[in-house]
Amino acid sequence: ASALRIFTQEEVTGHRSLEDGVWVTYKGAVYDITEFVAMHPGGDKILLAAGGDLEPFWALYAVHKQEHVLEILAEYKIGEL
Ligand code: HEM
């Protein structure tokens, strides 16, 4: 188990491709979702949020406002901003 780390916004912004890793933030937490990209039911659209915050995209795609989606996200948490 890895300890919770604190990341800067710059570190998150530096992870926005499958090569460098795909990180996103949500409500102040940081997630490495690289492994989830290929499993996403909404396909490559998920990469629009790479290196940034999920909130504006999830506001547009309300399908994410469900407990089971947050449970998936929680699996990929690596730290906080
Ligand atoms: C659907 C997870 C980011 C667009 C879904 C579903 C899950 C999911 C579990 C299926 C929901 C259901 O039908 O019950 C995630 C996670 C994300 C993420 C964990 C981030 C880590 C995004 C982003 C976008 C997006 C950033 C758009 C820019 C969509 C769309 C669908 C979808 C359009 C509907 C696909 C369909 O039913 O045809 N997502 N999503 N997702 N997602 Fe995401």
Image (cartoon, helix red, strand yellow):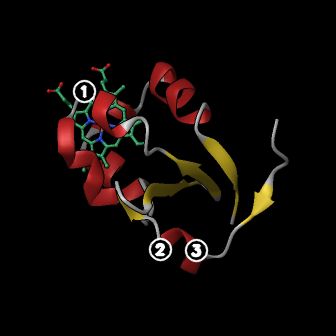
- The amino acid at mark 1 is Pro
Circles 3, 1 touching at the beta carbon (< 8 Å): no
Q: Report whether 21 appears left or right of 11.
A: left
- The amino acid at mark 3 is Glu
Seen at 52% across and 30% down, the residue is 70
**Place of residue 14 in the rendered image (x, y in percent of width and height, measured from the top left):** 47, 74
- The amino acid at mark 2 is Gly
Query: Alpha-carbon distance for marks 3 and 1?
Result: 27 Å
Q: Nearer the viewer, residue 57 or 10?
A: 10
Ligand 1 sits in which quadrant?
top left
Query: Alpha-carbon distance for marks 1 and 2?
Result: 25 Å
Task: Say whether disc 1 or disc 2 marks the residue closer to the N-terminus.
Answer: 2
Please, is residue 21 above or below residue 40 in the view? below
- Label 2 residue near ligand 1, CB within 8 Å: no
Task: Say whether disc 3 or disc 1 marks the residue closer to the N-terminus.
Answer: 3
- Label 1 residue near ligand 1, CB within 8 Å: yes
Seen at 67% across and 49% down, the residue is 78
Q: Report whether 22 appears left or right of 30.
A: left
Name the mark on residue 14.
2
Q: Quadrant of residue 47?
A: bottom left
Name the mark on residue 11.
3
Query: Alpha-carbon distance for marks 3 and 2?
Result: 5 Å
